[in-house]
């Protein structure tokens, strides 16, 4: 009986760790999504600066 409880305890700990990992992944993906929306603006601005430099 004790071994069964220990096994269930490990399963619960593994499940809790998976939930925490998923929560961290979700938060990081949201933060990355916010960064990705701003990144193309920066790259477009840099490309425009290079084109203006070449034109001059």
Image: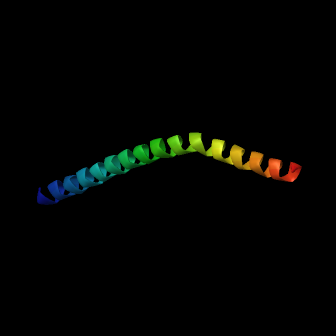
Q: Residue furthest right?
A: 55
Q: Residue 23 at what x, y percent from top left?
A: 36, 45
Rendering coords of residue 1 (x, y %)? 11, 56
State which quadrant residue 45 falls in.
top right
Query: Is residue 5 found left or right of 43 in the rendered image?
Result: left
Q: Residue furthest front?
A: 56
**Residue 12's spot in the image, x, y percent?**
24, 50
Residue in the image at 25% along x and 54% along y: 13
Residue drawn at x 16%, y 60% as measured from the top left: 3
Query: Toward the viewer: 56 or 1?
Result: 56
Q: Where is residue 18 in the image (x, y as percent from the top left)?
A: 34, 50
* 26 lies left or right of 5: right
Depth order, front residue of 22/32: 32
In the image, 37 versus 27, the foreground residue is 37
48 or 36: nearer the viewer = 48
Taking the image as shown, residue 1 lies to the left or right of residue 10, namely: left
At 58% from the left and 39% from the top, the residue drawn is 37
């Amino acid at each position: 009986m004790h071994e069964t409880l220990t096994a269930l305890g490990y399963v619960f700990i593994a499940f809790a760790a998976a939930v925490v990992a998923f929560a961290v992944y979700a938060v990081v993906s949201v933060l990355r999504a916010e960064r990705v929306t701003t990144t193309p603006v920066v790259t477009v601005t840099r490309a425009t600066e290079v084109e203006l430099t070449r034109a001059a």
